[in-house]
Image (tube, grey):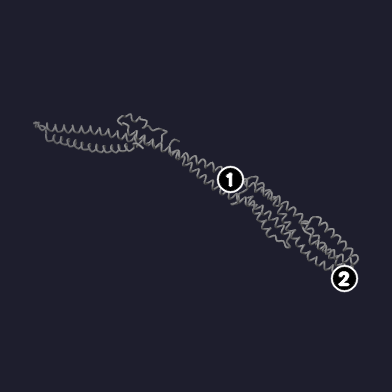
Amino acid sequence: MNKISSKLNFISLTLSFLILAILTMSIIINNRDKRDALTINIAGKERMLTQKMGKEIFYALHQKKPNFKYLDSTVEEFEHNLANLMKGNNKIAKPATPMIKNELSNIYKEWKNYYNLIISLKNTIGEYSKNKYMLDSINENFEEKVKFISNKISDSKIEILKINIDRLITHLMVLDINDDSENFEEFYLFYRNISDYINQLYNHYPEDMKNIILYWGYYSDIISIYLNDILTIKENQQNFYELGNNLLNNIDLTVMHYTIYSQEKRELYFFIQLSLGVIALILIAIAFYLKSNIVAHLYSFLKTSDAMSNTNIDDESYLSNPHFQVCENGSELDEANIHIHNFLYRIDAVIKNVKQGIVESQKAAKELNDMSVGLESEISQLNDNTINKDSLVKYIDVTEDIAIESLEDLNNTANLLDKLQSNLNDILVNTKIKDV
């Protein structure tokens, strides 16, 4: 690749390819960064949604009329985002590595258990709130019935029953889901004691205690259901928190792996861009080197032109001069210089040969004219009547005219060749290198 044009073509094509590659890489990196950022954002949002579901369950447990509207919307958004992370779409990339894909599969399995537990908690909390509201109404009715018996029967045992029922209702109202097992055991013990005490009073006052004992049975059933709801919620709540923590940990792990993968990919793209940039700088340096090389060839071209213009073209050995030899590894300027001067010198040689021929032709034409004049003089002196003098003179005159016309044509041709040679000499003179 010693030709200047070949080097320039190589540099131009390679630089064009590198620029196109860098632009393409920048576009790819920009698009990938957007997709990765959105993917990491969605994965991180799943963590927030998991925490929000726990908060909504906590709020629902402490509301008289639990509203699951926000919980349902949170669950729906979580499922939608998880499906997009697992399958991908036009904005979110599919799982980038087998590890991330496996982690998302584990998250999906845990989510199914978590979702079933949410449904169970929703149903249990709904029943719990309904039974608690029902107990509020039953407690008032039960207090009225006990108060009525207490006013009717003047007995300290009835008064004790009234006091214990008030304590039972108070204890029941303050009983909370977050209470420890000791409070529930204390309540059960107190509840059983009151039940036994009501049965004893029924034995003493069967008619008066009949409505009380019937209402107590109904009241006991509601209390049993209410307490069972509390225990179920406590058990599910514990499982809910454990599954929620596991789900959060897995989501955190997935987000971390997404971030690591994105960072590694960015580093790889940066290395590729840096490599392409270094190659581009090297090519630019080569381009500057070629520029200086072209300038050197230009000066060499001018020096060669000056040397050729001073060459004696009369000596046929000028063609063997190294300045007139086309080097296979030379530049295009050297080749152009050599070809131009070879052409000019060959034309100049041809012109000189033609001019030499014209001079010889002029001599021949002049001699022919002189011979014609002499012949005409000799013919005029002949006295032989057998010769047609007029006819001979006529032919001799025609010959003289032809000779004269030939001389004129040769003179015109010589003038034209002189002009051509003058122009060629001007070209040779103008190619001489000037002193700087």
Q: Which mark is residue 245?
A: none
Quadrant the C terminus occupies: top left
Q: Please, what is the three-letter code of the amino acid marked with disc 2?
A: Lys
Q: Quadrant of residue 264?
A: top right
Residue 6 spot, x, y in % from top left: 44, 38
Q: Quadrant of residue 193?
A: bottom right
Neighbours of disc 1 within 10 Å: few (<14), some (14-19), many (20+): some
* Residue on which disc 1 sits: 266
Give the vertical position of 40 relative to 132 (above or below).
above
CA–CA distance between discs 2 and 1? 87 Å
Residue at 70% across / 56% down in the picture? Answer: 55
Residue 433 spot, x, y in % from top left: 35, 36
Relative horizontal placement of residue 7, taking residue 101 as reference (left or right): left
In this rendered view, identify the residue nearer to me: 311 or 419.
Answer: 311
Describe the element under mark 1 as helix, strand or loop. helix
Sequence order check, earlier mark of 2 and 1: 2
Q: Which mark is residue 152?
A: 2
